[in-house]
Image (cartoon, rainbow, N blue to C red):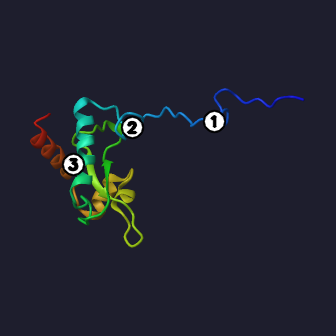
Amino acid sequence: MTTRRRAHNSTLAVPTKPIDRHTPLRNRGGTSFKLSPDGKAMWKWLGLLTIGQRLPCDGCGRYQWLSRSHLLAKSRGGRVLNNIALLCEDTITHPGCHPRQEKNTDRYIEQTGVDLYAKARGHTARWRKETGRG
């Protein structure tokens, strides 16, 4: 009788043990960007801000569940500061702004006429004013 063996790096190697994923999101505050201390602080501040206050979506103005959205990709030089807009997610009755903006920021701005880059700069300015950082 032969024992069926699996590779040591197989996800099925030890079925009772939870899978340990080493992703860029781990211990980074939920973003795949390489974060500076200021960037990390602002990312967490925006997350707490969306939980603690009812804020309007930067795209459509609805008061809905908001996501922190990077406007400019990391591969194109985007960072956290001056690069995050708060956009709503899809609901049953209304398509969200975040899925429409995803990887198409410039086209989204052309279609809606809302300058998300100005809104992102506004979030950074508010963060700097409230925390005294930056």
Q: Is residue 70 above or below residue 97?
A: above
Q: CA distance from mark 2 to mark 1?
A: 23 Å
Q: Residues within 10 Å of mark 1 (few under 14, many from 20)?
A: some
Rendered location of residue 50, percent (x, y): 25, 53
Q: Residue furthest bottom?
A: 93
Q: Left of 103 or right of it: where is 79?
A: left
Q: Is residue 105 above or below residue 38?
A: below
Circle nearer the N terminus (3, 1): 1
Q: Amino acid at mark 1?
A: Thr
Q: Amino acid at mark 3?
A: Ala
On residue 120, which mark appears? 3
Give residue 92's quadrant in the image: bottom left
| Residue at disc 3, secondary structure | helix
| Closer to viewer: mark 2 or mark 3 | 2
| Residue at disc 1, secondary structure | loop
Of 69 and 10, nearer the camera is 10
Give residue 97's quadrant in the image: bottom left
On residue 32, which mark appears? 2
Circle nearer the N terminus (2, 3): 2
Q: Which residue is mark 1?
A: 11
Q: Left of 126 or right of it: where is 48?
A: right
Residue at left 63%, top 36%? Answer: 11
Q: Residues within 10 Å of mark 2 (few under 14, many from 20)?
A: few
Q: In the rendered view of the protein, which quadrant contains the N terminus?
A: top right
Q: Amino acid at mark 2?
A: Ser
Q: Left of 3 or right of it: where is 104?
A: left
Circle nearer the N terminus (2, 1): 1
